[in-house]
Image (cartoon, rainbow, N blue to C red):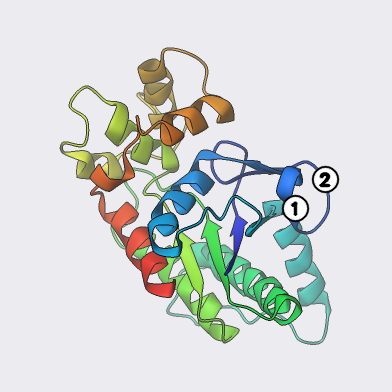
Amino acid sequence: MFFLLSGEGPTDIGSGRTTEGICEGDNFVVGPMAIIVEQIVKPCLKYSILDGACGFVSKHHLSQRAAELKIAKKKLRLPGKKQVKETRYFFNNARVLSRIAMDIQVDRKGKVVAVLFRDSDETASAASSLWEDKRKSMLDGFTEEGFLNGVPMIPKPKSEAWLICALKKHSYQGCEALEKRSGNDKSPNSLKGELKKLLDEDITPELLCEKVRGKVVDIDRIKMPSFKAFRDRLEQVI
Protein backbone atom coordinates (compact mmCIF):
# COMPACT_ATOMS: atom_id res chain seq x y z
CA MET A 1 0.00 0.00 0.00
CA PHE A 2 1.31 3.42 -1.01
CA PHE A 3 0.40 6.74 0.65
CA LEU A 4 0.19 10.01 -1.22
CA LEU A 5 0.34 13.02 1.09
CA SER A 6 -0.33 16.68 0.34
CA GLY A 7 -0.09 19.60 2.75
CA GLU A 8 0.39 23.33 2.99
CA GLY A 9 3.93 23.67 4.32
CA PRO A 10 6.93 22.30 6.24
CA THR A 11 5.26 22.51 9.67
CA ASP A 12 2.34 20.27 8.68
CA ILE A 13 2.75 17.42 6.15
CA GLY A 14 6.24 18.51 5.10
CA SER A 15 7.97 19.74 1.97
CA GLY A 16 9.83 18.56 -1.11
CA ARG A 17 13.52 19.04 -1.85
CA THR A 18 12.81 19.22 -5.59
CA THR A 19 10.15 20.72 -7.84
CA GLU A 20 9.11 17.29 -9.11
CA GLY A 21 5.42 16.49 -9.04
CA ILE A 22 5.82 13.71 -6.50
CA CYS A 23 8.70 13.72 -4.00
CA GLU A 24 9.70 10.38 -2.50
CA GLY A 25 12.48 9.06 -0.30
CA ASP A 26 15.13 11.62 0.61
CA ASN A 27 13.35 14.21 -1.53
CA PHE A 28 10.44 14.28 0.93
CA VAL A 29 11.19 16.29 4.07
CA VAL A 30 8.72 14.80 6.54
CA GLY A 31 6.58 17.11 8.68
CA PRO A 32 4.76 16.40 11.98
CA MET A 33 1.38 15.69 10.37
CA ALA A 34 2.96 13.06 8.13
CA ILE A 35 4.38 11.38 11.24
CA ILE A 36 0.88 11.38 12.75
CA VAL A 37 -0.40 9.60 9.63
CA GLU A 38 2.43 7.08 9.98
CA GLN A 39 1.71 6.46 13.67
CA ILE A 40 -1.96 5.75 12.98
CA VAL A 41 -1.42 3.26 10.16
CA LYS A 42 1.73 1.50 11.40
CA PRO A 43 -0.07 -0.75 13.94
CA CYS A 44 -2.38 -1.94 11.13
CA LEU A 45 0.18 -2.38 8.37
CA LYS A 46 3.09 -3.50 10.58
CA TYR A 47 5.52 -1.25 8.72
CA SER A 48 6.33 2.45 8.50
CA ILE A 49 5.00 4.24 5.44
CA LEU A 50 7.98 6.60 5.79
CA ASP A 51 10.30 3.78 4.73
CA GLY A 52 9.64 4.08 1.02
CA ALA A 53 5.86 3.69 0.97
CA CYS A 54 4.79 7.31 0.63
CA GLY A 55 5.13 10.32 -1.62
CA PHE A 56 4.51 14.04 -1.24
CA VAL A 57 2.63 16.40 -3.55
CA SER A 58 2.96 20.11 -2.86
CA LYS A 59 0.08 22.55 -2.66
CA HIS A 60 1.73 24.46 -5.54
CA HIS A 61 1.78 21.38 -7.77
CA LEU A 62 -1.90 20.69 -7.11
CA SER A 63 -2.70 24.28 -8.03
CA GLN A 64 -0.75 23.92 -11.28
CA ARG A 65 -2.56 20.71 -12.16
CA ALA A 66 -5.92 22.29 -11.36
CA ALA A 67 -5.12 25.20 -13.67
CA GLU A 68 -4.23 22.81 -16.48
CA LEU A 69 -7.47 20.91 -16.06
CA LYS A 70 -9.53 24.08 -16.11
CA ILE A 71 -7.94 25.12 -19.41
CA ALA A 72 -8.54 21.70 -20.94
CA LYS A 73 -11.89 20.64 -22.40
CA LYS A 74 -12.66 18.51 -19.36
CA LYS A 75 -12.94 21.27 -16.82
CA LEU A 76 -13.18 20.71 -13.10
CA ARG A 77 -16.85 20.84 -12.15
CA LEU A 78 -17.57 23.25 -9.35
CA PRO A 79 -19.87 22.28 -6.50
CA GLY A 80 -23.57 23.01 -6.86
CA LYS A 81 -25.27 26.15 -5.65
CA LYS A 82 -25.94 24.59 -2.26
CA GLN A 83 -22.21 24.54 -1.52
CA VAL A 84 -20.65 27.77 -0.31
CA LYS A 85 -17.96 29.46 -2.37
CA GLU A 86 -15.23 28.88 0.24
CA THR A 87 -15.35 25.10 -0.27
CA ARG A 88 -14.57 25.03 -4.01
CA TYR A 89 -10.86 25.12 -3.28
CA PHE A 90 -11.15 21.96 -1.14
CA PHE A 91 -13.29 20.22 -3.76
CA ASN A 92 -10.86 21.00 -6.59
CA ASN A 93 -7.78 19.97 -4.60
CA ALA A 94 -9.37 16.63 -3.78
CA ARG A 95 -10.20 15.99 -7.45
CA VAL A 96 -6.67 16.70 -8.64
CA LEU A 97 -5.06 14.63 -5.88
CA SER A 98 -7.43 11.78 -6.75
CA ARG A 99 -6.27 11.80 -10.36
CA ILE A 100 -2.62 11.70 -9.35
CA ALA A 101 -3.31 8.86 -6.88
CA MET A 102 -5.16 6.81 -9.48
CA ASP A 103 -2.28 7.21 -11.94
CA ILE A 104 0.06 5.86 -9.26
CA GLN A 105 -2.28 2.92 -8.63
CA VAL A 106 -2.00 1.98 -12.30
CA ASP A 107 1.79 2.34 -12.32
CA ARG A 108 2.34 0.46 -9.07
CA LYS A 109 -0.50 -2.02 -9.54
CA GLY A 110 -1.48 -1.59 -5.91
CA LYS A 111 -3.70 0.38 -3.56
CA VAL A 112 -2.96 4.05 -2.95
CA VAL A 113 -4.32 6.08 -0.05
CA ALA A 114 -4.35 9.87 -0.51
CA VAL A 115 -4.28 12.16 2.55
CA LEU A 116 -5.12 15.78 1.81
CA PHE A 117 -4.13 18.18 4.59
CA ARG A 118 -5.56 21.68 4.68
CA ASP A 119 -6.11 23.92 7.69
CA SER A 120 -9.72 24.97 8.09
CA ASP A 121 -8.45 28.46 9.05
CA GLU A 122 -11.90 29.69 10.01
CA THR A 123 -12.39 32.61 12.36
CA ALA A 124 -14.10 32.38 15.73
CA SER A 125 -17.19 34.02 14.20
CA ALA A 126 -17.42 31.65 11.23
CA ALA A 127 -20.55 29.57 10.73
CA SER A 128 -20.46 26.40 12.80
CA SER A 129 -21.04 24.32 9.65
CA LEU A 130 -18.07 25.72 7.69
CA TRP A 131 -15.59 23.03 8.79
CA GLU A 132 -18.05 20.29 7.88
CA ASP A 133 -18.76 21.98 4.54
CA LYS A 134 -15.05 21.98 3.72
CA ARG A 135 -14.61 18.37 4.78
CA LYS A 136 -17.64 17.29 2.75
CA SER A 137 -16.28 19.17 -0.27
CA MET A 138 -13.09 17.11 -0.08
CA LEU A 139 -15.04 13.88 0.18
CA ASP A 140 -17.22 14.99 -2.75
CA GLY A 141 -14.10 15.75 -4.77
CA PHE A 142 -12.70 12.26 -4.15
CA THR A 143 -16.08 10.73 -5.04
CA GLU A 144 -16.37 12.82 -8.21
CA GLU A 145 -13.25 11.08 -9.54
CA GLY A 146 -14.36 7.63 -8.39
CA PHE A 147 -11.48 7.47 -5.91
CA LEU A 148 -12.43 5.53 -2.79
CA ASN A 149 -9.31 5.98 -0.66
CA GLY A 150 -9.22 9.74 -0.09
CA VAL A 151 -8.76 11.07 3.44
CA PRO A 152 -9.45 14.69 4.44
CA MET A 153 -7.07 15.89 7.16
CA ILE A 154 -8.60 19.19 8.23
CA PRO A 155 -7.71 20.40 11.73
CA LYS A 156 -10.20 22.86 13.20
CA PRO A 157 -9.23 25.61 12.97
CA LYS A 158 -5.60 24.61 12.28
CA SER A 159 -2.95 22.03 13.18
CA GLU A 160 -1.60 24.11 16.06
CA ALA A 161 -4.81 23.29 17.95
CA TRP A 162 -4.06 19.55 17.85
CA LEU A 163 -0.54 20.14 19.14
CA ILE A 164 -1.61 22.58 21.84
CA CYS A 165 -4.06 19.94 23.13
CA ALA A 166 -1.06 17.81 24.09
CA LEU A 167 1.33 20.55 25.18
CA LYS A 168 -0.88 22.83 27.29
CA LYS A 169 -0.78 22.77 31.09
CA HIS A 170 -3.78 20.49 31.52
CA SER A 171 -2.91 18.32 28.55
CA TYR A 172 -5.65 16.54 26.60
CA GLN A 173 -8.38 18.07 28.80
CA GLY A 174 -11.12 20.26 27.37
CA CYS A 175 -9.47 20.38 23.96
CA GLU A 176 -12.79 20.76 22.15
CA ALA A 177 -12.67 24.43 23.15
CA LEU A 178 -9.58 24.90 21.00
CA GLU A 179 -11.67 24.17 17.92
CA LYS A 180 -13.77 27.25 18.62
CA ARG A 181 -10.74 29.55 18.53
CA SER A 182 -9.79 31.75 15.59
CA GLY A 183 -7.47 30.35 12.93
CA ASN A 184 -6.20 33.85 12.13
CA ASP A 185 -2.52 34.14 13.08
CA LYS A 186 -2.96 37.91 13.48
CA SER A 187 -5.75 37.60 16.03
CA PRO A 188 -5.06 38.33 19.72
CA ASN A 189 -3.97 35.20 21.55
CA SER A 190 -3.50 33.33 18.27
CA LEU A 191 -3.00 29.58 18.29
CA LYS A 192 0.40 29.94 16.64
CA GLY A 193 1.47 32.42 19.30
CA GLU A 194 0.25 30.13 22.06
CA LEU A 195 2.10 27.15 20.60
CA LYS A 196 5.30 29.18 20.46
CA LYS A 197 4.93 30.08 24.15
CA LEU A 198 4.32 26.46 25.11
CA LEU A 199 7.41 25.35 23.20
CA ASP A 200 9.40 28.25 24.63
CA GLU A 201 11.25 28.58 21.34
CA ASP A 202 10.63 29.24 17.67
CA ILE A 203 8.34 26.83 15.87
CA THR A 204 10.34 24.72 13.41
CA PRO A 205 9.43 21.55 11.50
CA GLU A 206 12.27 19.71 13.22
CA LEU A 207 11.04 20.62 16.69
CA LEU A 208 7.44 19.64 15.97
CA CYS A 209 8.55 16.33 14.45
CA GLU A 210 10.61 15.65 17.57
CA LYS A 211 7.55 16.23 19.79
CA VAL A 212 5.39 13.87 17.75
CA ARG A 213 8.03 11.17 17.29
CA GLY A 214 8.88 11.25 21.00
CA LYS A 215 5.20 10.88 21.97
CA VAL A 216 5.27 14.21 23.80
CA VAL A 217 2.28 14.65 21.51
CA ASP A 218 0.40 11.40 22.12
CA ILE A 219 -2.10 10.98 19.29
CA ASP A 220 -3.99 8.27 21.18
CA ARG A 221 -5.02 10.86 23.76
CA ILE A 222 -6.25 13.56 21.36
CA LYS A 223 -10.06 13.32 21.36
CA MET A 224 -10.90 16.48 19.42
CA PRO A 225 -13.78 16.06 16.90
CA SER A 226 -11.73 17.22 13.89
CA PHE A 227 -8.90 14.83 14.79
CA LYS A 228 -11.33 11.95 15.35
CA ALA A 229 -12.99 12.57 11.96
CA PHE A 230 -9.60 12.39 10.25
CA ARG A 231 -8.45 9.31 12.17
CA ASP A 232 -11.71 7.40 11.69
CA ARG A 233 -11.62 8.00 7.93
CA LEU A 234 -7.95 6.99 7.65
CA GLU A 235 -8.51 3.77 9.58
CA GLN A 236 -11.57 3.07 7.45
CA VAL A 237 -9.77 3.26 4.11
CA ILE A 238 -6.78 1.16 5.16
Q: Which residue is mark 2?
A: 18
Disc 1 designates what residue? 23
> 10 Å neighbourhood of mark 2: few (<14), some, or many (≥20)?
few
Secondary element at image label 2? loop
* Mark sitting earlier along the chain (2/1): 2
Find out whether the residues at labels 2 and 1 contact each other: C-beta distance under 8 Å: yes
Viewer can see residue 224 = yes
Image location (x, y in percent) of residue 187: 41, 29
Is 127 drawn above or below residue 81 in the view shown? Answer: above
Q: Quadrant of the C terminus?
A: bottom left
- Amino acid tagged 2: Thr
Residue 175 shows which numbered tag? Answer: none
Q: How many marks?
A: 2
Tell me residue 234's x, y (percent).
41, 65
Q: Amino acid at mark 1?
A: Cys
The correct choice, above or below, for 19 with respect to 170 in the image is below
Q: CA distance from mark 2 to mark 1?
A: 7 Å
Residue at left offset 76%, top offset 86%: 74
Left or right: where 25 falls relative to 3: right
Taking the view exactly as shown, the residue that stands out farthest to the top is 200
Residue 133 at least partly seen: no
Instruction: Between residue 172 and residue 26, name the one nearer to us.
Output: 26
Please tell me how crowded label 1 is: few (under 14), some (14-19), or many (20+) other residues with Cα within 10 Å: many
The answer to which quarter of the image holds residue 18 is top right
On the picture, is 147 further left or further right than 37?
right
In the displayed structure, would residue 6 be above or below residue 146? above
User: Which element carries disc 1, helix, strand or loop?
Assistant: strand
The image shows residue 96, relative to residue 187, as above or below, that is: below
Quadrant assignment for the N terminus: bottom right
Q: What residue appears at the point 35 percent right and 38 percent down from the top-left corner? A: 161
Q: Is residue 107 left or right of residue 139?
A: right
Residue 33 lies, in percent from the top left, at 49, 45
